[in-house]
Image (tube, rainbow, N blue to C red):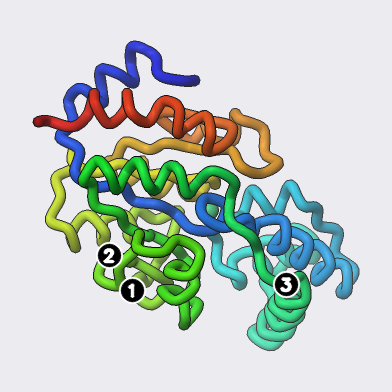
Amino acid sequence: MALDEQALKALGNMDLKAVFFDMDGVLFNSMPFHAKAWVEAFKSIGIDFNEYEAYMREGMTGNGTINEMFQKTYGRLATEEECKKLYQTKMHLFEECGKAGTIPDVDKVLKTVKENGLDIYIVTGSGQKSLINKLDSAFPGIFSKDKMITAYDVKKGKPDPEPYLMAQAKGKYQKNEAIVVENAPLGVVAGKAAGLFTIAVNTGILKDEELTSRGADLLYHNMEELWEELPTIIKTSKKQ
Ligand code: MG
């Protein structure tokens, strides 16, 4: 699902000014660690959960994931105490995995976006306190504190359009002035629900159709693929 006529037409109607980047699975290769931690955390209380299911729920809150699995296994929601305990186990297992590296070639994508004079936003459900420091050390000079939407800003989070609508409002962009880069089904749902052109990059283990069926406008399998078509995407969508 690379640049076809339909995508080129949609991009041609744009006046691109900003790119909204998701973080986990787009900038940092943290999803394998999250998935592993969830599988092991559920295993510790005897619930079967696999990595594919973890990737499908990327972006959901911890309690959301826990309640879905309790409902499925026991036909009831988890208690507050159960949620808290299991989420702590998951976070502990995640931290034991160490520091996630960056997604290969995403630095090239960011550089191209910046060189073309477009604004770069982070739109993430993550609530890490030192996020800007982490971003700065991995991608020097790319991100700024005033162009971030994180867990601290939103009430609902993805798949609700709220985080992308907040980024749009923050930069005072029209719908045709910003595009989204996402890796997760629920992230694509959020981007499309916000009315934005949404590029999916399948950096994980999911089948492509998990992303295309959620309405992704373009699909790539890695950042290199996106980077190769990025000059055309920008040229088509940016008014001079
Ligand atoms: Mg993601």
Q: Which of 181 and 165 is in front in this view?
A: 181
Whether the residue carrying mark 2 lies under 8 Å from ligand 1 is answered with no
Callout 3, which amino acid? Gly
Mark 2 or 1, nearer chain start: 2
Q: What element carries label 1?
A: loop
CB-based contact (under 8 Å), mark 1 and mark 3? no
Residue at 18% across, 32% down: 238
Callout 2, which amino acid? Lys
CB-based contact (under 8 Å), mark 2 and mark 1? no
Callout 1, which amino acid? Asp
Cα separation, mark 1 vs mark 3, equals 27 Å
Q: Which mark is residue 98?
A: 3
Residue at 74% across, 80% down: 92
Residue at 22% across, 54% down: 168
Residue picked out by circle 2: 147
Classify 46 as above or below 218.
below
Q: Which of 83 and 234 is in front in this view?
A: 234
Query: Is any part of residue 215 visible from this angle?
Result: no
Q: Where is residue 44 in the image (x, y as percent from the top left)?
A: 88, 74
| Residue at the extreme left of the image, as rendered | 240
Cα separation, mark 2 vs mark 1, equals 12 Å
Cα separation, mark 3 vs mark 2, equals 27 Å
Q: Where is residue 101 in the image (x, y as percent from the top left)?
A: 64, 60
Pointer 3: residues within 10 angstroms few (<14), some, or many (20+)?
few
Residue 40 appears left or right of 186 = right
Pointer 1: residues within 10 angstroms few (<14), some, or many (20+)?
some
Q: Nearer the viewer, residue 118 or 86?
A: 118
Classify 123 as above or below 53.
below
Mark 3 or 2, nearer chain start: 3
Residue 86 appears left or right of 143 = right
Residue picked out by circle 1: 153
